Image (cartoon, rainbow, N blue to C red):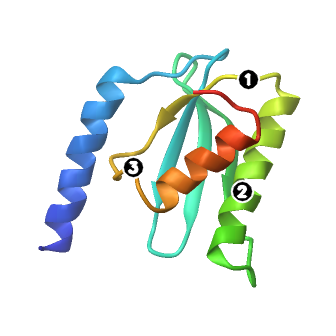
Amino acid sequence: MNNTLKRENRIKRHSRIRAKVAGTAVRPRLAIFRSNRHLHLQLIDDVAGKTIASASTVKLTGKKPADRLSAISQTLAEKAGKLGIKQIVFDRGGYGYHGNISKVAEEIRSKGLKF
């Protein structure tokens, strides 16, 4: 399958998800972006249009991929805890709910955030 077609299909799926999912200041949206090398997580307040907190695997070098996922999940959960956020809305970004996406969701849940 052509790479541009894959990307377009993911964007279509993501737009369908975004039509149903929105974050607020009390319950922000956890948006996930997965590149070929890295994973980026953001807590977004869609009402104000601002990113509340973020975490990424870009600065984590020399660790195994599973350790990176755990580290960014913990980082994001700590930032959310400091802001008093206990519940979030999960936005998988058009990606399938398997592999790294499901691992991040499990890690975030284990750190105390509910969705």
Q: Nearer the viewer, residue 42 or 97?
A: 97
| Mark toward the viewer: 3 or 2 | 3
* Figure quadrant of residue 53: top right
In the rendered image, the quadrant that contains the N terminus is bottom left
Q: Which mark is residue 97?
A: 3
Q: Position of residue 2 (x, y in %)?
A: 13, 73
* Figure quadrant of residue 44: top right
* Furthest-right residue in this view: 82
Residue 51 shows in the view = yes
Q: Position of residue 46 (x, y in %)?
A: 51, 23
Which residue position is annotated with label 2? Answer: 72
Horizontal arrangement in the rendering, residue 113 relative to residue 93 (left or right): right
In the rendered image, the quadrant that contains the C terminus is top right
Q: Could you tell me how far apart the alpha carbons at marks 3 and 2 are, in whole angstroms?
A: 18 Å
What's the amino acid at mark 2?
Answer: Ile
Answer above or below: position of 4 versus 51: below
Q: Which mark is residue 86?
A: 1
Q: Mark 2 or 1 closer to N-term?
A: 2
Q: Mark 3 or 2 closer to N-term?
A: 2
Q: CB atoms at circles 3 and 1 under 8 Å apart?
A: no
Residue at image coords 34%, 52%: 96
Q: Could you tell me how far apart the alpha carbons at marks 2 and 1 are, in whole angstroms?
A: 17 Å
Label 2: element kind: helix
